[in-house]
Image: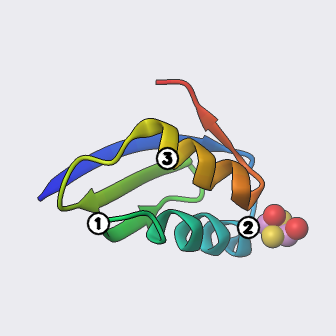
Amino acid sequence: MSESVFTVSGMTCGHCVSSVTEEISQLDGVQNVAVELDSGKVTVTSAQPVAEDDVRAAVTEAGYTLVAS
Ligand code: 9UX
């Protein structure tokens, strides 16, 4: 099990959180996605570490921005 932490900007409400959570949840091997609205902190739990590019694509698809880490 692996935990990867990212920061997403642009989320302003609970629906934003749901959109980001749903998109990242669709990535291969993802078991849990925890999104904090206020901080933009996103913790992804997965069997293998997720690729940042895949997370960026999912966040972009949802309409938000992955902050460079
Ligand atoms: Mo409502 Mo959250 O547009 O973007 S879903 S603020």
Q: Amino acid at mark 3?
A: Asp
Q: Disc 2 marks which residue?
A: 13
Q: Secondary structure at mark 1?
A: loop
Front-lying residue, 4 or 58 = 58
Which of pointers 2 and 1 indicates the residue nearer the eye?
1
Query: Which residue occupies the extreme left position in the image?
Result: 1
Q: Amino acid at mark 2?
A: Cys
Q: Which mark is residue 29?
A: 1
Sequence-wise, the earlier of marks 2 and 3 is: 2
Instruction: Work out how far the residue at label 1 is from the one at label 3, CA to CA, in angstroms.
Output: 12 Å
Q: Secondary structure at mark 2?
A: loop
Q: What residue is drawn where x is 24% and y is 61%?
A: 46
Instruction: Work out how far the residue at label 2 is from the one at label 3, CA to CA, in angstroms.
Output: 23 Å
Q: Secondary structure at mark 3?
A: helix
Instruction: Work out how far the residue at label 2 is from the one at label 1, CA to CA, in angstroms.
Output: 27 Å
The reply to whether the C-beta atoms of the residues labelled 1 and 3 are less than 8 Å apart is no
At which x and y percent is residue 59? 63, 52
Q: Disc 3 marks which residue?
A: 54
